Amino acid sequence: MADVARLAGVSHQTVSRVINGSPSIKPETRERVLQAIERLGYRPNIAARALVRGRSGMIGIIGTARTFFGPTSIHRSVEDAAREAGYFATSVSLSDVTRRALSDATEHLMRVGVEGIVMIAGHDEALEVVRMQPARVPFVVVEGDLSKASLTVGVDQVRGARMATEHLLSLGHREIVHVSGPLNWAEAGRVEGWRLAMSESGLRPAEPVRGDWSSESGYTAGERICEMPGATAVFAANDQMAIGVLRALHECGRRVPDDISVVGFDDVPEAAYLIPPLTTIQQDFDAVGRRAIEVVTQAIKGTELQPSPLVIPKLVVRKSTAPPTRTST
């Protein structure tokens, strides 16, 4: 920093103020300092600055080691947003989402000195762990049951499921099968949205076909749907299961969308390139990540927090949905 100050012809304190984004620096002075920083290849020692401030500058993230598109995308967006906010992000990925594993992950992050934790487990057990933890650092729950934690961020899952179901209803479908994920995951709110939309249309929804978020479970669900001659539409709770459903329907001779329509949830990158391209619900994972970091950093600073509004998903209509060509029986 002394070398930068000497080259720019300013004081050590001026360089420090430029690095910390002080608004009191004249534009021409700031530019001179930034040019000196670039020329010398100077990088602030963040660890040393953290010691001076008595803060670690670290945010912990707890996620899962599974490769589900939604949680993985949120994890990446939280890491990006933390870095942009000037924090280090240190992560713990869990192969098994159990209360013991979540508690151990929390204790590990506490030991390394994080200032706040973002939990993306999206599982009922995660909420129990959050409630049981003493308030040593702020916890933000992402994609959990957002009514059960004080600091929460997420997508409006119920609304997204309603969008998917109402799209199929608007096309004239009346027997809409839902392929759900495990009901102890937060995304089970998609079941609620499907049921609400069906009930409000005067229809009695059957029990959902249970999956586990994987394409394999979607394929198994699709085999069962092949044996439901009255079904004219399927709403799968994520795109990976929808992909499995498409394969099973193809193999049993049910054409999509001529014989049966299919809607997914998440809008994975491959959704637009399937045969047929998949109608789905798009989640803004970048917005979720930014909002999670905004909430946790405000909590770290002691700012009074207002409830964070849910991120609104978007219906993306492609060619896997169409009006039914026959009346369900």
Image (cartoon, rainbow, N blue to C red):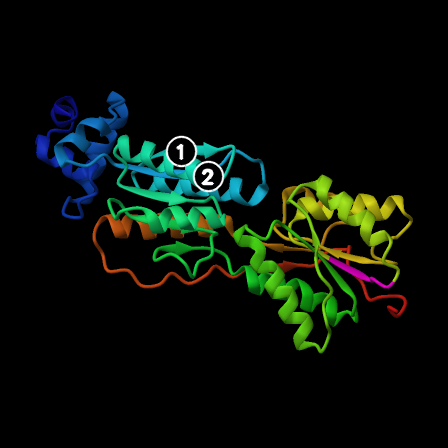
Residue 280 in percent (x, y) is at 67, 55
Front residue (pair 157, 13): 157
**What secondary structure is the stretch in magenta mostly built from?**
loop
Residue 19 in the figure: left or right of residue 295: left
The answer to if 7 sits in the magenta stretch is: no
The label on residue 266 is none
Front residue (pair 8, 266): 266
The answer to if 231 sits in the magenta stretch is: yes
Residue 15 in the figure: left or right of residue 257: left
Image: 38 above or below 315: above
Tell me the CA gap for discs 1 and 2.
8 Å
Q: Circle 1 — which element?
A: strand
Image: 272 above or below 201: above
Amino acid residing under circle 1? Ser
Residue plotted at (89% across, 66% down):
325
Mark 2 neighbour class, 10 Å CA radius: few under 14, some 14 to 19, many 20 or more: many
The label on residue 91 is 1
Front residue (pair 42, 80): 80
Amino acid residing under circle 2? Gly
Q: Which residues are magenta?
A: 230-234
